[in-house]
Image (tube, rainbow, N blue to C red):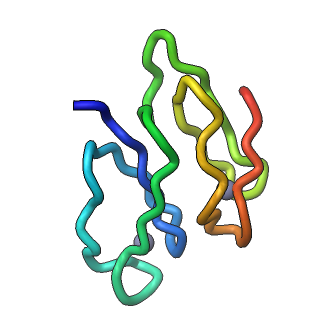
Amino acid sequence: MQMKVWMCKKCGALIEKPTQPNATRCPSGGTHFWYTLGDGYITPHSGYTAWQCGKCGAVVYMKRMPNGGGCPAGGNHHWRRL
Ligand SMILES: [Zn+2]
Ligand SMILES: [Zn+2]
């Protein structure tokens, strides 16, 4: 199954999972609010490009630019290639 990267808009937690994660307890209060960044990984994989958000500092590994929505720093992520 294709792995997807998910980020909680509230606390910035990053996880890899093929399907939507459960809305378990978020350290920022209430439950996590997951956004998918797209197909990829949170650790380096051959053939995948490293992308970093200039706002929240998150680094993910994807073949294409990750999705913009749900930056924990507010608004959209600003992705650039590392
Ligand atoms: Zn959270
Ligand atoms: Zn961001």
Q: Residue at x 42, y 66 (%)?
A: 34
Question: In the picture shown, does residue 7 fall above or below 80?
Answer: below
Q: Quadrant of the C terminus?
A: top right
- Tell me which image quadrant ligand 2 sits in: bottom right
Please tell me which residue lies in front, 76 or 72.
Answer: 76
For this orientation, the residue located farthest to the top is: 46
Q: Quadrant of residue 1?
A: top left
Question: In the picture shown, does residue 13 fall above or below 50?
Answer: below
Q: How many marks?
A: 0
Please tell me which residue lies in front, 30 or 64.
Answer: 64
3 relative position to 50: left or right: left
Q: Residue 30: horizontal and vertical position, in percent?
A: 37, 89
Q: Residue 67: horizontal and vertical position, in percent?
A: 60, 48
Question: In the picture shown, does residue 31 fall above or below 40?
Answer: below
Q: Quadrant of residue 13?
A: bottom left
54 relative position to 19: left or right: right
Q: Residue 69: horizontal and vertical position, in percent?
A: 62, 61
Q: Residue 45: horizontal and vertical position, in percent?
A: 43, 18
66 relative position to 74: left or right: left
Q: Residue at x 38, y 74 (%)?
A: 32
Q: Residue at x 46, y 10 (%)?
A: 46
21 relative position to 41: left or right: left
